[in-house]
Image (cartoon, coloured by chain):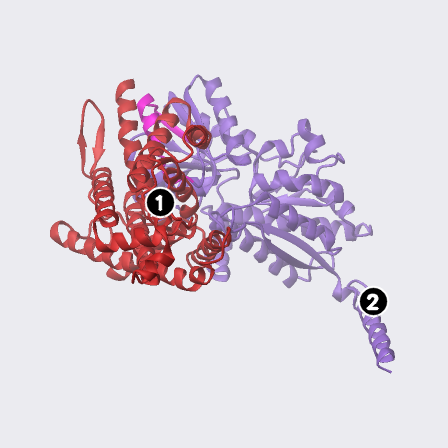
Amino acid sequence: MNRRIFVAGIAVLVLATMLGLPGDLGAQDKVVKIGLSLPITGADADGADAILKGAQMAIAEINAKKGAGGYKLEAVVFDSATPAAGQYDPAQAATNYKKFIADSLVMAAVGPVMSGEGKAISPILSEADMATITPSSTNPDITDPKFQSQYRPKGKAVYFRTVTTDAYQGPNMANYLFHTQKVKSVYILDDGGAFGVGIADSFQKRAGELGVKILGRDRLDPKEADYKTILTKIKGVNPDGLYYGGVMQAAAKLATQAHEVMPRVIKAGSDGVYDLSWPKQSGKEAVEGWFCSQASPELVTSQKLEAWVTKFKSEMKRDPTNYAITSYNAVHVIADAVSRTAAANKPLTRANLRDAIQATKLGSIQGPIAFDANGDILTRTVSIYQWREGEIKYVGVAPEK
Amino acid sequence: MSGLDVVLQQVVNGLALGMMYALLALGFTMVYGIIELINFSHFSVFMTGTFVGLTLLNLMGLTAGSLTGMALVGALVALFVLTMTVTGLLGVVIERICLRPVRHVSGTAPMITTIGVAFILINVMLLTWGPQTQRFPQLLPNWRWTLVGTVEITFKQLVLFVVGLILMVVLSHLVQRTTLGKAMRATAQDADAARMMGIDVDRVVVLTFFLGSALAGAGSLFFGLYYGFTAYYIGYTTGLRAFTSAVLGGIGSIPGAVLGGLFIGLTQSLGGQLLGVKWTDVIIFSILIVVMVVRPSGLLGVRVTQKA
């Protein structure tokens, strides 16, 4: 008797599951899930939070307007930072993307935030023919055809960006420091991460071409407390400028101690230190004068986006960043690709969506978005900023030469 | 700065850094000397101490430059007493709940327990304070003096150095010359015999933990005041070097901990200057291996106490 009830129960459950499968019940239930894997805890949490909220705002807006091509968008959010790392963890990012792939409704992803994560997940995406759109990771190797066998073994681009790469971000900062700040000698540090090392390399190469004297290059351990040793060494060679390639964990301490040891040296970083919580972490006086960059045009203060920024602030209860906007647009790229796939009556598969994303020609709030064959955005603007009195101020577009 | 000046400046930096490691190694090595327990939770107690200090500073409403002169000294004394009491009590709680029940278990069980406690503390601090670097108010004045040429020593470095040496002398005196110290050493040699002689072994062990953890609390305030930040992971990185200092100096030896700390600090700063800071850990641990192979008991390897 009990056994019969059990079998009957199972049968009901199986039936219910089959009937309940989304997509089988008609248009109103058609869902496309977008995977979001971001380091929402950890040292870079503030930047990741802005990026997450940019994407969420886009999803909410698109759903309010009947979705994309009849599909409702749904975010699947995973944290890619781990307590052990205290910041983003490439292994965790890989796990998250494998979970996305295991969920048949996840058709594309927005992310990752960090290039270190990107290197870990790009080959996984290539295997699954699934596209991701990163709003912030800028290491050029991931999309470089030279490393195709490593990062996209199946050949087709799967790693698209709504920001440009460090092939421009690092060198353009070198151009700016040389032409505008008249920096003639520089010491270069990185934080040992994939992004930090890559951008420091590209900065160093360009600085060398410009004839800036490279006085040295060293690597910070992000978890070390004492940077006085390296700063004393740098002070000893008396450079005009200090360039730091890396993200916040090391930067938080570097700024405080550099301010103590060599307050007058010109200091610059990348988008890795474009973090609104930096003055809180290191002290207002310590970040004063630091230059940083964004691999996108300046959007937050642009007049055209005033209404958008006001809406973001009131709905998301925080200040936007440029990468909140590139993330917002990443969702729009996916939504646009879903609409076009549906309009062409093609089955909505990851591979078809990837092809549609590749063919993107979208006018967006950051300007036109289109990708080259490797997935890189065609607009290659790098913006320069400076910390002044605890606030990040837009300086201008970095010179391309 | 001339080349020689830079090297001399690195020596000054290295000695101050070494004293920081020594401050942490002192309490750690003392506990080991008395109950022969490698207490990895010590460094997490130190990390917790920085957050205790930060909380107290916030409660007292102290920020950089808000106090000077005697008012500052008074506030600092209160801060040290309170923080050291809290971390001391934390040590007692850890001993009572996690270590006393396994004290008679032979093998590595007690040591593994301390690793567990360390991770619990790390995660509790991570979850309550978040992973970002927390700023520690810079209460101490930024005075600096020129020694020779362009070589400078800061007031903070000087304080660190003087306090480290004083603590070493006081601790050595306590262990070697007082009744409590005698009871500690007796407990270390043979707990059962000590108990038969009328020593309250539990009380001695608790006191040892209180002292060791209070020292960690002092170390945490110096860390915060010196570096101006704290984060949940400092107990691991700084602690690993402090642990190495204690082993290098001869674990259980109080002057050894200071010597080991200074040695590591100097190695770190001079190694960074001559080779590059990316080689720091390679240099430090290579030297550790060499010392351990040549002198397995460490630089000052005569144990203060020995367990039967």
Pinpoint the chain carrying mark 1: A
Query: Percent from the top left, x then y, of residue A190?
Result: 46, 32
Pinpoint the chain carrying mark 2: A
Query: Percent from the top left, x then y, of residue B8?
Result: 26, 24
The tint of chain A in the picture is purple
Query: Percent from the top left, x then y, of residue B103?
Result: 44, 58
Total count of labels? 2
What label sits on residue A154 in the rendered view? none
Residue furthest to the bottom in view is A1
What label sits on residue A282 in the rendered view? 1
The tint of chain B in the picture is red
Question: Which residues, given as a range, are shown in magenta?
Answer: A224-243
Residue B32 painted magenta: no
Residue A239 painted magenta: yes
Front one among A197 and A60: A197
Asked whether the viewer can see residue A390, the reply is no
Front one among B111 and A217: B111
Going from N to C along the chain, the mark reached first, 2 or 1, is 2
Amino acid identity at mark 2: Met
Name the residue: 76% across, 48% down: A350
